[in-house]
């Protein structure tokens, strides 16, 4: 079976629902069937490869190595309950568009996962970015939603420039886009490709300094946040590093830079999440922190550990977002200190508790094992990275407990003006929470070893002392979370990414805006000035012609009219008499000639002679005068 069917099937389903019925049941059923079929195809296509000829020189390649097969199954497995939740929970207005975009989002992600060359990856990367923009700005009628979608799109596009550089460098060095050809690149170009890939991955996965776009993405619907943070766009960056880490392993700086970036983001994200009072933003900051741990594992040289944490993270982060969205819909807001909806939503609270414990990293849940595995992986690069990873794990336990306590604790309660969650919403959250429990099998050593063999990776062993120390960090984090939940944390600037958005505003947005304004003034002053001068001259000339027309032409017309009237009066008086008198005079002259003409023919010789003499005299006079 060709792997191309994996992106094709959800894409066709996504386009098909757009013109169809808007009934919630119909939309949920179509999405569920399409994603279930995609999941089955992903399982059946394991190990398959395919090539699609674009032109004589360019080909698109797809491949399903074991790790890609796992990810290809993960995306529809998470998207299926999320789409069912969306069909039952989200607003009816625009629901067809939302479900269609979610399916297209899954299609783009599947194409990204099966890509075996940088060109196919770039196409999928762009499709995922465009879908994320449309999904975040889904409620485009609200001004903040459109601005948030544009902000997230621009920030991630800035990082995408790195991927464009990497693609061009790879083709310039090898004449091919294939992943397999990267190892043959000259060292200088391989450095360029690795740096570009790291930059693009950091932007997509919300790593420093790109992290603030995750907060702005919270303007999107809850189902969008759940899919985007669990198994789609944010996961794309970590997956790219997992997929290409073997090609960059020879670069000494790549591993160190990736690990430092990941640990820094994990700590900053954990601190921001601990200070946040907005439920969805707390979860968004925790997403950034946990993907930072995945980056650290890749930098330490253990991409399989990062992949397994990506799986467990998807399992607990999706239900947490869905639970937070349900609570926000019920209360009408997302302010944690005013939620405490455990009594009014017991089922959702129980499912959220399972996912929150996995987020905290407590055994025997799968999230706890993968976090310990990351600490063990970075410990192979020294004790300092291991301690920092454990500290990030402790912060994760703190904000996980704080979230669960404040959102679903048994307090005095708060507003419950919204509707209660329905069966479909609870079933979707419960299914994902069950996956968190099932992933606890990762604690079983024989299964873990088998996974390492099948997925062709390495899982480092952690000494018992190291695991005990990591567990102590988790317990300390739980204590810190309990204290922070009991005490009111006033919103501070530090909760907004430690002031990073303001720094970005000052360093980039402000200067770029000022430069744009300067360019506008230069454009208006130098380039537009001649045009405006010509326009002003034309306007003045037109006004002058108008005045001339009003004064001279109209006066000339009035003069001509007066002359015409004078001529008319002249023609009506002397002219008429002249025109009438001339024919009458000629007639009288002819009449006179007619009367005297017979007299000249009277037969008298002396009259003839007299005429002859007169004629001769006239002729002589004419000859004399003519000479």
Image (cartoon, rainbow, N blue to C red):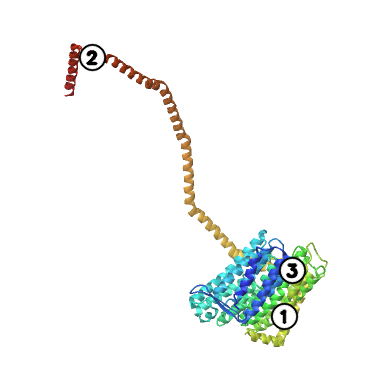
- Quarter-wise, where is residue 107 in the image? bottom right
Rendered location of residue 515, percent (x, y): 54, 60
Side (left or right) of 221 relative to 408: left
Which quadrant holds the N terminus? bottom right
Residue 429's mark?
none
Q: Residues within 10 Å of mark 1 (few under 14, many from 20)?
A: many
* Residue sitting at x 17%, y 18%: 616
Rendered location of residue 388, percent (x, y): 67, 79
- Quarter-wise, where is residue 432 in the image? bottom right
Nearer the camera: disc 3 or disc 1: 1
Q: Which residue matches tag 2?
A: 601
- Residues at marks 1 and 2, CA–CA distance in whole angstroms: 153 Å
Q: Which residue matches tag 3?
A: 324
Pick the residue in front: 292 or 586: 586
The reply to whether dot 3 and dot 1 touch (C-beta < 8 Å) is no
Rendered location of residue 223, percent (x, y): 70, 68
- Residues at marks 2 and 3, CA–CA distance in whole angstroms: 141 Å
- Quarter-wise, where is residue 60 in the image? bottom right
**SS state under label 1:** helix
**SS state under label 3:** helix
Q: Which residue matches tag 1?
A: 439
Rendered location of residue 588, percent (x, y): 33, 17
Q: Earlier in the sequence, mark 2 or mark 3?
A: 3
């Amino acid at each position: 079976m060709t792997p191309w069917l994996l992106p094709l099937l959800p894409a066709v389903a996504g386009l098909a629902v757009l013109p169809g019925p808007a009934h919630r049941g119909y939309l949920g059923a179509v999405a569920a069937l399409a994603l279930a079929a995609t999941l089955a195809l992903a399982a059946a296509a394991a190990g398959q490869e395919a090539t699609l000829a674009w032109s004589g020189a360019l080909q698109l390649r797809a491949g399903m190595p074991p790790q890609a097969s796992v990810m290809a199954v993960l995306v529809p497995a998470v998207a299926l309950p999320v789409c069912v939740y969306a069909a039952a929970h989200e607003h009816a207005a625009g629901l067809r568009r939302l479900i269609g975009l979610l399916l297209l989002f899954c299609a783009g992600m599947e194409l990204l996962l099966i890509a075996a060359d940088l060109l196919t990856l770039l196409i999928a990367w762009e499709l995922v970015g465009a879908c994320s923009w449309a999904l975040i700005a889904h409620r485009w009628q609200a001004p903040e939603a459109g601005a948030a979608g544009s902000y997230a799109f621009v920030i991630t596009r800035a990082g995408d420039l790195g991927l464009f550089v990497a693609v061009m460098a790879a083709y310039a060095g090898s004449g091919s886009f294939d992943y397999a050809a990267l190892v043959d690149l000259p060292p200088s170009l391989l450095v360029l490709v690795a740096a570009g890939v790291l930059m693009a991955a950091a932007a997509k996965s919300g790593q420093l300094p790109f992290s603030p776009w995750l907060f702005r993405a919270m303007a999107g619907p809850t189902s969008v946040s759940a899919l985007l943070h669990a198994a789609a766009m944010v996961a794309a960056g970590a997956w790219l590093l997992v997929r290409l880490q073997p090609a960059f392993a020879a670069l000494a700086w790549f591993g160190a830079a990736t690990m430092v970036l990941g640990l820094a983001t994990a700590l900053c994200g954990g601190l921001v999440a601990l200070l946040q009072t907005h439920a969805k933003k707390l979860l968004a900051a925790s997403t950034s922190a946990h993907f930072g741990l995945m980056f650290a594992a890749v930098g330490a040289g253990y991409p399989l550990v990062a992949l397994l944490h990506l799986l467990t993270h998807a399992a607990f982060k999706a239900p947490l977002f869905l639970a937070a969205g349900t609570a926000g819909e019920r209360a009408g807001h997302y302010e944690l200190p005013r939620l405490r909806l455990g009594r009014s939503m017991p089922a959702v609270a129980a499912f959220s508790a399972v996912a929150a414990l996995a987020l905290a990293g407590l055994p025997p849940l799968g999230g706890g094992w993968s976090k310990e595995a990351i600490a063990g992986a970075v410990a192979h690069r020294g004790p300092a990275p291991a301690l920092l990873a454990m500290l990030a794990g402790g912060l994760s336990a703190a904000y996980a407990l704080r979230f669960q306590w404040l959102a679903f604790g048994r307090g005095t309660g708060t507003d419950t003006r919204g509707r209660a969650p329905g069966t479909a919403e609870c079933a979707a959250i419960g299914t994902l929470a069950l996956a968190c429990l099932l992933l606890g099998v990762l604690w079983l050593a024989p299964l873990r070893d088998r996974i390492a063999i099948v997925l062709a990776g390495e899982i480092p062993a952690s000494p018992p002392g190291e695991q005990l120390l990591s567990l102590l960090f988790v317990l300390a984090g739980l204590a810190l979370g309990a204290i922070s939940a009991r005490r009111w944390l006033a919103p501070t600037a530090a909760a907004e990414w430690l002031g990073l958005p303001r720094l970005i505003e000052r360093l980039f947005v402000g200067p770029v805006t000022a430069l744009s304004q300067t360019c506008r003034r230069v454009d208006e002053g130098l380039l537009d000035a001649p045009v405006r001068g010509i326009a002003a001259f034309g306007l003045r000339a037109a006004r002058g012609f108008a005045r001339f027309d009003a004064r001279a032409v109209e006066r000339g017309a009035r003069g001509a009219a007066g002359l015409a009237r004078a001529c008319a009066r002249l023609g009506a008086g002397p002219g008429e008499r002249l025109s009438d008198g001339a024919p009458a005079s000629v007639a009288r002259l002819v009449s006179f000639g007619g009367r005297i003409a017979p007299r000249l023919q009277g037969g008298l010789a002396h009259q003839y002679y007299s005429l002859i003499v007169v004629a001769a005299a006239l002729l002589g006079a004419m000859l004399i005068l003519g000479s």
